Every structure is written in C-alpha cells, then in structure tokens.
Image (spheres, rainbow, N blue to C red):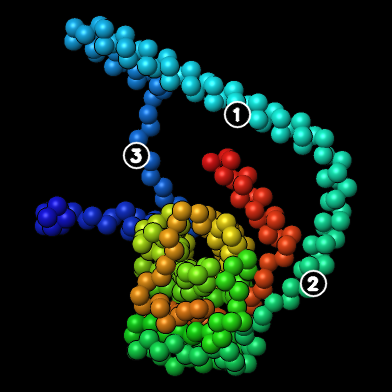
Amino acid sequence: MWINVHELNGDDLRIGKKLGSYLCDAGFTDVRIKARYEVYPSLDFIGESLALQLEKAGQPEHAECLRAEVREQKEKIMIRYLTTFALVFAMAVSAQAEDQKDSSEKKLETKTEKESAKKEKGLVLFDGKSLAGWKSTNFGGEAEVSVKDGAIHLPEGSDMTGITWKDAKKIPTSNYILEVEAQRVDGSDFFCGLTFPLGKDPCSLILGGWGGGVCGLSSINGFDASENETTIYREFKNQKWYKVKLQVDGDRVQVWLAGKNIIDQPREDRMFSIRLECELSRPLGFATWRTSGALRKLKMRKMTAAEIKKSKAEHIEKAKNE
C-alpha cells in the first residue's frame, strides 16, 4: 500500500539503485555509494541529557538511578578495555620473542611459495580454438555461440546467451583463482555473468548489469548484485577487453577488475545463492543479458598454501581495522 501510494504520487522508490548509473552517465568512472543512517553521541551525553529531563519532570531519584547505571556501564567498559590491553601486551611480548624465528623463516617461505606456484599450473578453460569442455547453455532464446579470433563469442540473445562447463569434478569449489578477459561487444547490459562454485553453494559475478554499470555478486542473503554490500558502479566501453580475476577462499570472495580490487566480500554469516535464470550455468558458466559479449584467456587454478595463508592474514587484519 505504501509503495503504491508513493508511486501514484510520482515518487521513484528505486532512485537509490539508479543513482550510480546516473553518475556514470554524467562522466564519473569510479562510483561507490554508501549510506549512514544514525551516529549516536557518547554514553555520558545521552545519560546526562535523560537525567536532566527526569529532574525537570520532578523525578530526581530516577535521575540519580540513571546516572548510577551509566557509571556502572562505564566501569564495565573500562574493565573490558584493560583486559583487552593486557592480552594485546602479552601477545606483543610473545611476538617480540619470536621475531628472530619469523625472520629466518621468511626466506624459506618465499622459496616455498615460488615452488608451489610452479606446481599449480591449473586448468586451461579455453584453448583459443574450440569450445572443448563447454556446452552452449540452453536458456531458451539463446543465440549461437561461436569461436573466432581466439575468443568465445556470445551474441545477444532473448534474453540470455551463455556457456556452461561440463565436468563439475574437474573444478575446485574453494581456494581457487579464476582469470578471464571479457568484452562487451555490443549492447548495454551485463556482458559477464560469471556463475561460480562457492563451497556447496553457487554465486554469480555480474559486470555491467542493470543498464550497463552495475557490478556485484548475486546473491547475498537474497539480495542481488544491484542491492547488496558488493554493489559498485563502473563505466564499460564496448569493444574493450577487461581483465577479471576472481579469488575464492574459506574466508572471502575477492574480485579484481583491470587490476583493481573492486569486491572483498567476507563469507561468514552470509547466505550465497544465484538468481533462478542462472541455474543452468552451474557449476561454472558465463552468460550475457540482451548483450553481445566475448571471452578469452580463461584459466583456473587452486591457490597455493602460501597464497591461502597470505589471504587469511589480510582478512584478519582487515577485520581488526573495521
């Protein structure tokens, strides 16, 4: 009822989703939209303000009880702070004692990382000549997929055209890196709808959707790429190749576009899924929406032990700073 009334009055309730596209159209190339709803004052300020109101209302005894409660809560906070400080200090002393050990292990770790990277040759998903390993996705209304000039071409369909990897057993479901170069050949919607495994669950990376500029993961807790915490806006030019890197580990999903990290999404306490129309892209697939796209240089490999360790350390450090 509320939505209907506002729409009848001419209001656009979805203006928030469209704002990023409007800014891209205006010439902005790096648009991130965030919202902050309320910022609360300190506990002292709130408590004293309420106590003064109680005194004005003729209830001084209640005002004093409130002040006492505020003091008690502050003492509890201070105890937690001192406990945390003691733990951090103890950890710092322990870390200092192990500095020499860590420094001596760094050279060995670097050597191991290089050796592991050589071993992880990975899976070449496209030989540049054929659709070996892939099949055209039967969306209904799809155009004919072809290979020419070293690229897979996904012509505009009604609504989707795509390819799906045939052998699910050959691809990892976590701790892996997938790289591809993608191009919007013609059209104005997503040219890279990459559906990928995320443990037991699937998820999709959307580039250039909802009118051409929306990027993000679909879906998180039921919200698609246009309306969740990964939503970001980018301007894409037709007939230009964009390097895409997807990294999935036990803690998070990361995406780099043209060498820049655009998504760093924690996995904990989130439910990942895909939209119904992408079901046929499982376990691994690419699709376009009413747009012609092209793909090349597809490869996938497992992360090395050193890469997993590094990613976990970065994730922990980022969580501390948030």
Q: Residues within 10 Å of mark 2 (few under 14, many from 20)?
A: few
Where is mark 2, residue-wise?
A: 118
The kind of residue tagged 2 is Lys
Residue 252 x, y percent position in the rendering: 56, 58
- Whether pointer 3 and pointer 1 mark residues with C-beta atoms closer than 8 Å, the reply is no
In this picture, residue 84 sits left or right of residue 51: right
Tell me the CA gap for discs 2 and 1: 42 Å
Residue in the image at 53% along x and 41% along y: 322
Callout 3 secondary element: loop
Tell me the CA gap for discs 2 and 3: 49 Å
Residue 168 x, y percent position in the rendering: 55, 82
Q: Residues within 10 Å of mark 3 (few under 14, many from 20)?
A: few
The kind of residue tagged 3 is Tyr
Where is mark 3, residue-wise?
A: 37
Q: Residue 84 has which mark?
A: 1
Residue 105 x, y percent position in the rendering: 85, 50
In this rendering, the answer to whether 146 lies above or below 286 is below
Callout 2 secondary element: helix
Callout 1 secondary element: helix
